[in-house]
Image (cartoon, rainbow, N blue to C red):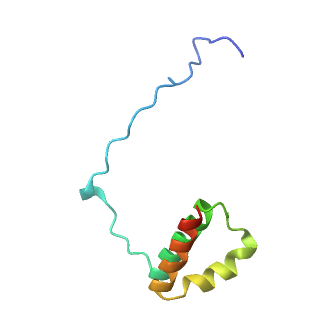
Amino acid sequence: MAPYTDDYRPAPAADFLLAPPNPAERLSYTIDPRDRHRLDLHAALTTAGIPPRPEDRDAIDQLSNLPADINATLQRWLHHTA
C-alpha cells in the first residue's frame, strides 16, 4: 500500500447514520400494481437465494400479471424458504 500524501487522504472508516427522509420531500409517483408485483417478486427471489436470470424475464412478467393475492402467496412461499 502506498504511503499517504498531502494530495490524497482516504475517507474515515467510521460508519455514520443517514438522516431520516423528510416526508414533505417525497416524490408523488404511483407505481402500477404489475410493476410493484414484479419488483416485489424480484426482491423475494433474490432474498430466497434465487437471483433472477435474464431468461427468467418472461416467467416473472407472467407471474406479475396474476392477482395481488396470488402474488402475495408466491412471495410468502419464497420468504418462507429464506
- Quarter the C terminus occupies: bottom right
How many marks the image carries: the answer is 0
Q: Position of residue 29 (x, y in %)?
A: 37, 71
Q: Nearer the viewer, residue 30 or 57?
A: 57
Residue 76 to residue 20: above or below: below
Which residue is located at x 51 percent, y 25 percent?
Answer: 13
User: Is 5 left or right of 70, judged from the image as shown?
Assistant: right
Residue 78 to residue 24: above or below: below
Query: In the image as oriented, which residue stretches furthest toward the left?
Result: 24
- Quarter the N terminus occupies: top right
Q: Position of residue 19 (x, y in %)?
A: 32, 42
Which residue is located at x 61 percent, y 62 percent?
Answer: 46
User: Is 30 left or right of 78, judged from the image as shown?
Assistant: left
Q: Position of residue 64 (x, y in %)?
A: 56, 82
Residue 44 to residue 65: above or below: above
Query: In the image as oriented, which residue stretches furthest toward the front?
Result: 80
Q: Position of residue 24 (x, y in %)?
A: 24, 57
Which residue is located at x 33 percent, y 69 percent?
Answer: 28
Asked where in the image residue 44 lies, by quadrant, the reply is: bottom right
Which residue is located at x 63 percent, y 78 percent?
Answer: 60
Query: In the image as oriented, which residue stretches furthest toward the right?
Result: 55
